[in-house]
Amino acid sequence: MRTFLASTAVALIAAVPPALADVVVVNQAISETEVLAAQKGWCQALVDISSTNANSGREAAAALAEKVIDSAYGYQMGTVLFKPTLTVNPHTFRITRAGALSYFVGGDSNYPNDSGFALRDWTQCEIENASIIITGSSASTMAKVNLTDSSGNVTTVDKTWKFVKDDAGQLRIVVHHSSLEFTGE
């Protein structure tokens, strides 16, 4: 039986026209491992931007933040639905790369209330997922993100992300909603 299956497979491969043999199959399916790695990478990037600011200044932190945004978010694919934690009207939503960069490191006069969320001396970032939903080519997560500063104070934010893959197969954040926990007051 194995010989029959092996010879049948060889015959099928040999029967594929040469033009089709060079066809590239793109699988945009997302795995849980990829989602967890993207979340962990986001956390590490936040801590890295903060430590770069402390060690080398805001300009170096901004340069790193630009690289992080370009590698983690999908702004090169179009609009990203980004609602950061500490924003107010008229700049609540950051659907452009410039808006996201300002939120993370400040310094953009178009967003005068931004002081740089990523510059707050974060030393640790941990994610506690409530759920991850993967539907083929997209993944959505809801989580508590615990941010620790150099004094040991922990700030917990509720975070929702949606990930898709770009044309190169890299996971990109296309929805990012973050808010402080409701305190009942």
Image: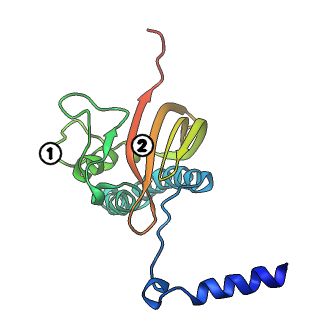
Asked if residue 91 is positioned above or below residue 74 in the image, the reply reads above
Going by the image, does 114 lie left or right of 10? Answer: left
| Residue 58, disc | none
Outermost residue toward the left in this view? 110
Going by the image, does 109 lie left or right of 79? Answer: left
| Residue 109, disc | 1
Colouring convention used in this rendered image of the protein: rainbow
Report the front residue among 61 and 135.
Answer: 135
Looking at the rendered structure, the kind of residue marked 1 is Ser
**Residue located 56% across and 87% down the image:** 15
Q: How crowded is mark 1: few (under 14 residues within 10 Å), some or many (20 or more)?
A: few
Q: Residue 102: image x %, image y %?
A: 26, 47
**Residue located 42% across and 43% down the image:** 120
Q: Residue under circle 2?
A: 120
Looking at the rendered structure, the kind of residue marked 2 is Arg
The secondary structure type at the circle numbered 2 is loop
Report the front residue among 55 and 89.
Answer: 89
**Residue located 52% across and 54% down the image:** 38
Q: In which quarter of the image is the C terminus?
A: top left
Q: Residue 58: image x %, image y %?
A: 32, 56
The secondary structure type at the circle numbered 1 is loop
